[in-house]
Amino acid sequence: MCVVTTRDGRLDHAITVSSFASVSLDPVLVLVCVHQDSRFLDAVTETRTWGLSVLAARARPAAAWLATPGRPVVDQLAQVPHRRGPLTGAALLDGSVATMECATEAEHAAGTHVLLVGRVLDVSLGPEDERPLLHHRGAFSEL
């Protein structure tokens, strides 16, 4: 599980995504899928930069909160410990297995979603003993 974030002016936007994929090693590209009608997609289309936090198992409450439809736009990260990415200003969740800062390279419509391809600008790895949070058969789980 991952949380993808962007900062539009003084407002944070965040969503939980069930997966991301490596696209290329040269240049380093990753992708996430974002629902075409989401507020997040509108914001990231404007900012063109975003953060990706690969969640640790203990981040289940944050993943559930940021996957809740209709949550308030303002202060949605108020109860989620995070820091600002130095290159993009996007929120990167504390205690993640890994975090990345990305610049949008391409957007591709795919059914009800948009594939958001990002060039990785920076990567930070968390502690080696962190277990990732997974999503399997409609529920959170761990390795």
Image: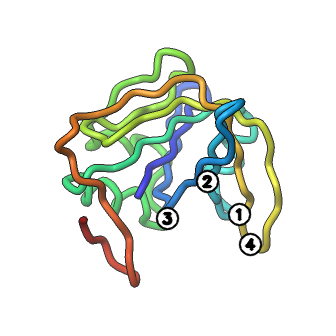
For marks 2 and 4, give the one nearer the viewer.
2
Q: Taking the image as drawn, is residue 79 in sight? A: yes
Label 4 – label 1 distance at C-alpha: 8 Å
Q: Residue 95 in the image: state x and y as whole percent.
A: 24, 38
Q: Tell me if mark 2 has few (under 14), some (14-19) or many (20+) residues whose alpha carbon lies within 10 angstroms of its own.
A: many
Helix or strand or loop: what does disc 2 sit on?
A: strand
- The residue that disc 4 covers is 112
Does the residue at mark 3 contact the one at mark 1 (Cβ under 8 Å)? no
Name the residue: 43% across, 52% down.
2
User: What is the quadrant of the N terminus in the image?
Assistant: bottom left
- The residue that disc 1 covers is 37
Name the residue: 50% across, 29% down.
90
For marks 3 and 2, give the one nearer the viewer.
2
User: What is the quadrant of the C terminus in the image?
Assistant: bottom left
- The residue that disc 2 covers is 32
Q: Residue 8 in the image: state x and y as whole percent.
A: 61, 31
Does the residue at mark 4 contact the one at mark 1 (Cβ under 8 Å)? yes
For residue 72, above or below residue 47: below
- The residue that disc 3 covers is 70
Instruction: Give the amino acid at mark 1.
Output: Asp
Name the residue: 25% across, 58% down.
61
Residue sitting nearer the eye, 57 or 28: 28
For residue 120, above or below residue 129: above
| N-terminal-most mark, 3 or 2 | 2
